[in-house]
Image (cartoon, rainbow, N blue to C red):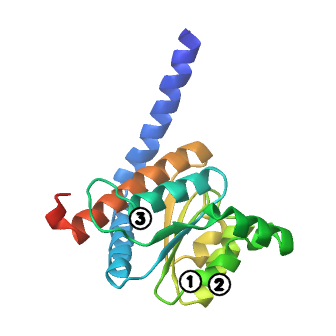
């Protein structure tokens, strides 16, 4: 039991340390604000925000899309946010008929429009299907926001804004992605719907 407690404390300390690094980085804080402002401008113009990720990052993408299309902290009008992996028929059809590398780029090609936003989550920044989605989004005149970690990988150069979590641990990066995503959701709600009490 003592060993287990030590593991628990160690993991909690690691998670806290990553978030403290972010809070002390003025460039990262400014970037979170810029991303929030970019999404606010897009939503005001009735643009779409599309999310994509793999594995745990797909879950995070779906989570954040739901906070925007549903609600985060207050009752307010819905915002157009969609996680591209939730359509299992499209995902499996594209994966089967083309390749898994194209499961997101084909959907971006179909659904994206100039001024829309792609939020691409990849802890390594090197997932091929995420890179192709970002590349397609740029071709369509969309804004690309990356949530990544480590050194940003190849995704970094494809992004207009890249939130690079200062960690090489996948779990810690994903935890920070959700924290930062929640901050962005709260800023969006409080800015767009101040009368609703956020």
Give the image quarter of residue 25: bottom left
Q: Can you give x and y, in whole percent of width and height, for residue 141 in the image?
A: 54, 90
Residue 46 spot, x, y in % from top left: 38, 83
Q: Can you tell which quarter of the image residue 85 is in? A: bottom right
* Left or right, residue 35 beside residue 192: right
Q: Is residue 62 above or below residue 144?
A: above
Q: Residues within 10 Å of mark 3 (few under 14, many from 20)?
A: some
Q: Quadrant of residue 2?
A: top right
Q: Secondary structure at mark 1?
A: loop
> Which percent across, then down, holds residue 171?
58, 43
Q: Which residue is mark 3?
A: 69
Q: Which residue is mark 2?
A: 109
Q: In terms of sequence position, does the residue under pointer 3 or pointer 2 come before the other?
A: 3
Name the front one of labels 1 and 3: 3
**Can residue 127 be seen in this snapshot?**
no
Left-right relation of 16 to 120? left
Of the residues under marks 1 and 3, which one precedes in the sequence? 3
Q: CA distance from mark 1 to mark 3?
A: 17 Å
State the residue at coordinates (60%, 67%): 84
Q: Residue at x 47, y 62 (%)?
A: 65
* Residue receiving disc 1: 112
Q: Give me the residue at 39% from left, 63% from top.
A: 68
Q: CA distance from mark 3 to mark 2?
A: 21 Å
In the foreground, 140 or 15: 140
Distance from the alpha carbon under mark 1 to that under mark 2: 6 Å
Which image quarter is the N terminus in?
A: top right
Q: Are dots 1 and 2 in contact, CB under 8 Å?
A: yes
Q: Secondary structure at mark 3?
A: helix
Any part of residue 150 in sight: yes
Dot 2: element: helix
Residue at 42 percent across and 82 percent down: it is: 47
Q: Residue furthest top?
A: 1
């Amino acid at each position: 039991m003592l060993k287990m407690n030590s593991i628990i404390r160690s993991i909690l300390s690691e998670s806290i340390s990553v978030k403290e690094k972010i809070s002390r980085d003025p460039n990262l804080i400014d970037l979170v604000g810029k991303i929030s402002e970019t999404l606010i401008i897009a939503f005001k113009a009735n643009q779409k925000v599309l999310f994509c990720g793999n594995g745990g990052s797909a879950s995070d993408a779906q989570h954040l899309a739901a906070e925007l299309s549903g609600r985060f902290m207050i009752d307010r009008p819905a915002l157009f946010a969609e996680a591209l992996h939730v359509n299992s028929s499209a995902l499996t059809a594209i994966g089967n008929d083309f390749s898994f590398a194209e499961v997101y780029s084909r959907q971006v090609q179909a659904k994206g429009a100039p001024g829309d936003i792609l939020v691409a989550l990849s802890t390594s920044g090197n997932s091929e299907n995420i890179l192709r989605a970002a590349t397609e989004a740029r071709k369509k005149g969309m804004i690309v926001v990356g949530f990544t970690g480590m050194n940003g990988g190849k995704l970094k150069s494809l992004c207009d804004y890249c939130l690079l979590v200062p960690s090489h641990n996948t779990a810690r990066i994903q935890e920070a992605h959700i924290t930062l995503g929640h901050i962005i959701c709260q800023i969006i709600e409080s800015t767009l719907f101040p009368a609703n009490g956020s």
